[in-house]
Image (tube, rainbow, N blue to C red):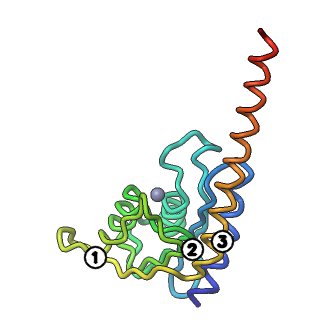
């Protein structure tokens, strides 16, 4: 079940690449049914909050007519950031399942923090290899692109002289 849903989240994540957004996908599931799915669209929409998780949570809320998503599970291809963890806890989602670990922005330790009145079960590493490959391929491509645009720029400056 977890693997199956993560595969759907991975498919969502792939949609981010078209707009050069970091490939992250999210799926909200309740009673074994998909309520909402979304992908990262930060670049596409010039909106810093347009992470896959936020968009999926918003969609789910709209569909159910309530912001509380008790008993929901959210599947995410990458460990959630601070903003998304805040939204997940506020929505009272009961369980987080993620793929790749995010060493820089990941906040999975907050899911079970005693400070908050809601705790969320969390499990990482589901389809980890696929999720990581998606991210590393994306960043490799981005670096290659930046490099070639730098070369073009240098060429241009040389030509001006
Ligand atoms: Zn996020």
CA–CA distance in space, label 1 to label 3: 25 Å
Camera-side residue: 24 or 69?
Answer: 24
Residue 10's tag is: 3
- Left or right: 76 in relation to 103: right
Extreme-left residue of the structure:
115
- Closer to viewer: mark 2 or mark 1: 1
Q: Secondary structure at mark 3?
A: helix
Q: Quadrant of the N terminus?
A: bottom right
Q: Secondary structure at mark 1?
A: helix
Extreme-top residue of the structure:
161
**Quarter of the image where one finds residue 148:** top right
State yes or no: discs 3 and 2 in contact (Cβ < 8 Å).
no
CA–CA distance in space, label 2 to label 1: 24 Å
At label 1, counting other C-alpha atoms closer than 10 Å, the crowd grade (few under 14, some 14-19, many 20 or more) is some
Who's the residue at 50% across and 75% down the image? 98
Q: Is residue 60 above or below residue 49?
A: below
Q: Is mark 1 within 8 Å of ligand 1?
A: no
Q: Quadrant of the C terminus?
A: top right
Report x, y in % for residue 45: 61, 42
Residue 35's tag is: 2
Who's the residue at 52% across and 55% down the image? 51
The residue tagged 1 is: 112
3 or 2: tag closer to the N-terminus: 3
């Amino acid at each position: 079940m977890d693997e199956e849903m993560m595969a759907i989240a991975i498919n969502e994540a792939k949609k981010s690449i078209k707009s050069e957004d970091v490939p992250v996908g999210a799926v909200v599931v309740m009673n074994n049914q998909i309520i909402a799915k979304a992908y990262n669209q930060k670049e596409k929409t010039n909106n810093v909050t347009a992470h896959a998780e936020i968009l999926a949570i918003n969609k789910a809320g709209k569909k159910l007519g309530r912001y509380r998503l008790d008993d929901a599970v959210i599947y995410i291809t990458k460990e959630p950031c601070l903003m998304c963890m805040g939204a997940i806890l506020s929505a009272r989602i009961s369980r987080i399942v993620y793929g790749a670990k995010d060493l820089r922005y990941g906040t999975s330790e907050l899911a079970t923090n005693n400070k908050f009145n809601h705790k969320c079960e969390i499990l990482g590493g589901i389809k980890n290899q696929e999720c990581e490959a998606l991210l590393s391929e994306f960043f490799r491509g981005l670096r290659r692109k930046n490099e070639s645009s730098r070369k073009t720029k240098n060429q241009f400056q040389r030509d001006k002289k």
